[in-house]
Image: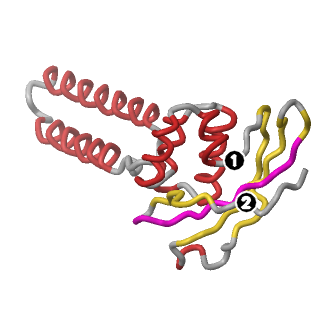
Amino acid sequence: MPHLSSRVKLYKKFLHLSLLANSNNNSDTGSNTSLDRHMRIIALLCLTILFGCSPDSSNSESKRTPEDVSLGFFNAIYVDRDVNKALQFVDDPMKKVLAHYHIAASVQRHVLNLSMTQVQMEIEEIDIDFFRKFTDDVTVIVKMQGLKGGEPWIDDRTIRLHKKGTKWEIIEILPEKGNLH
């Protein structure tokens, strides 16, 4: 499937051919009017196919995996420090909780019980792989490395996600089991 810029180039070529055919018909005094009509129909059909078969314009957030949602949430809180950005990854009850705290530092302290800076994170464990298409609930453990009180710190947080339609949302931050310090 061609990209939009190549589609525009194709459209310009068809337009140029159509104008060229039209100017040839005017110079031939109407002897090729059926050819001109056929060229326009072919050009119109090709344009309809090119622009009608555009890629799905639906939101890419419905294509996010549980891993993408988990890392996106923690990245919004710990790296970007933007609660509003984090809201897209959680369900409605969690949105209310996050909105209550307003700033990322408060969410770190009161919701996640882990204030850190210079955080790097990775997925440590996820409880599904093979049967991903058949489950609607997932538990993900995110391992975080950074500074806590200026000292190097390694910890993890476990979150639970639920699939609503085609979109994964964080529904719960599970109580911590202890740090890996």
Q: Nearer the viewer, residue 170 or 39?
A: 170
Figure check: 6 above or below 67: above
Position of residue 77 in the picture relative to residue 59 (left or right): right
Residue 81 pos. (x, y %): 62, 31
Q: Residue at x 70, y 67 (%)?
A: 126
Figure check: 141 above or below 47: below
Q: Kindly report the secondary structure that dominates the magenta region of the rendered protein.
A: strand
Residue 180 pos. (x, y %): 88, 55
- What residue type is disc 2 on? Glu
Q: Which residue is mark 2?
A: 176
Counting residues from the start of the chain, the first of labels 2 and 1 encountered is 1
* Secondary element at tag 1: loop
- What residue type is disc 1 on? Asn
Q: Residue at x 26, y 40 (%)?
A: 43
Residue 73 pos. (x, y %): 60, 46
Q: Which residue is mark 1?
A: 113
Q: Residue at x 87, y 30 (%)?
A: 150
Whole-number angstrom distance, CA of label 2 to CA of label 1 = 8 Å
Total numbered badges shown on the rendered structure: 2
Per the rendered image, the range of residues in magenta is: 153-165
Which quadrant of the figure has residue 66? bottom right
